[in-house]
Amino acid sequence: MSPRSGDAERVDFLGVGQHFTTGGVRVDALSGVDLSVQPGEFVTIAGPSGCGKTTLLRLLAGFQQPSAGEVRVGGRRVLGPGPDRGVVFQAPNLFPWLTVAGNVELGPRLRGVGRARRREEAARYLELVALGEFARHRPYQLSGGMQQRCQIARVLANEPSIVLMDEPFGALDALTRERLQGELLEIWRATGQTILFITHSVEEAVFLGSRVLVMSPRPGRIVLDEPAVFADPAGTRAPIEAIRSLPAFVELADRVRAAITEEQVSA
Ligand SMILES: Nc1ncnc2c1ncn2[C@@H]1O[C@H](COP(=O)(O)OP(=O)(O)OP(=O)(O)O)[C@@H](O)[C@H]1O
């Protein structure tokens, strides 16, 4: 797996607003969002339900255009989805008729990568998410956590320089979640990809992020933007249970929690 930090590009949200009108009712999902993300940052995003976190990711993915402002990658306006950005959704969305390896190979296949090479790549990414032994299985033969790991391998096999993750571990049991957190950190350290990761868990946000954002209730704005060092590439490989009792961790988690609660109360 080649380090990608050289390929990653800066992300900019410039005065981004997004409203939706449904049945004559207007909902302001985002308002005045200004945010720059440097290549290789691991940005976690927390905030109350409905504050526009998914909308923010969808705009960067290019699934929709903002009502105001601009989203840019590498200085160029985002006008649609592209291979530089990969999206991991909360629920695994594997193709049931393909094997696990077939799902992971699909992206490289569509990009015209030759058979031998894409098999090799799929095997490597499946190893990375500890699914090497399940390459010939079908998705229905995997547990929910394994399907989610397969989805992650499938997105990574496209080698996007920016990975967008919308509560990818939200539906998993605590043990599987902690294991995947560790695996994701290893992948991030190895690839230097830029990651934007939405979570409802304050601890997960503080543990994984090199930078933690909190958004206000609708219309979503960024109300807290703090560096976090617990997943620093040069940092220790300590698991979350060892890190969560560190005073600096507790202090940042408290501030993130307070930002979410204060915003909810004042909304
Ligand atoms: N396509 C759409 N059409 C109409 N309204 C939408 C659309 N997408 C999002 N919204 C509205 O925009 C607001 C923000 O939604 P969004 O999904 O971005 O929030 P979120 O912070 O990700 O929420 P959650 O944490 O519950 O997943 C919500 O009020 C939602 O109903």
Image (cartoon, rainbow, N blue to C red):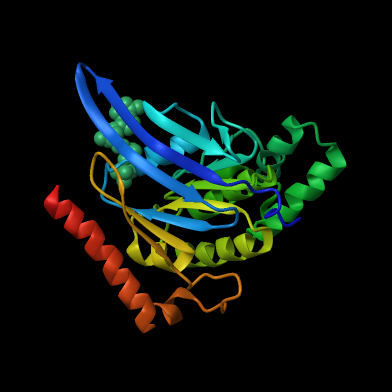
Can see residue 132? Answer: no
Residue 243, picture quadrant: bottom left
Residue 149 in the image: state x and y as whole percent: 57, 53
Q: Is residue 142 left or right of residue 64?
A: right
Q: Name the residue located 64 percent from the left edge and 39 percent from the top edge.
A: 84
Q: Residue at image x 72%, y 40%?
A: 105
Between residue 148 and residue 211, name the one nearer to us. 211
Q: Of 49 and 150, which appears nearest the observer? A: 49
Vertical comparison of 134 with 243: above or below: above
Residue 121 percent across, percent down from the top left: 77, 49
Residue occupying the far left of the picture: 266
> Quadrant holding ligand 1?
top left
Vertical arrangement, residue 185 with respect to residue 93, above or below: below
Occupied quadrant, residue 172: bottom left
**How far from the left and from the top, in percent, is residue 239?**
50, 76
Which quarter shows the N terminus? bottom right
Determine the residue positioned at 53% across, 37% down.
72
Residue 225 coordinates in the image, percent (x, y)? 37, 58
For this view, does 19 lie left or right of residue 114?
Answer: left
Residue at 54% across, 31% down: 78
Count of all numbered marks drawn on residues in the image: 0
Q: Is residue 83 at least partly visible in the picture?
A: yes
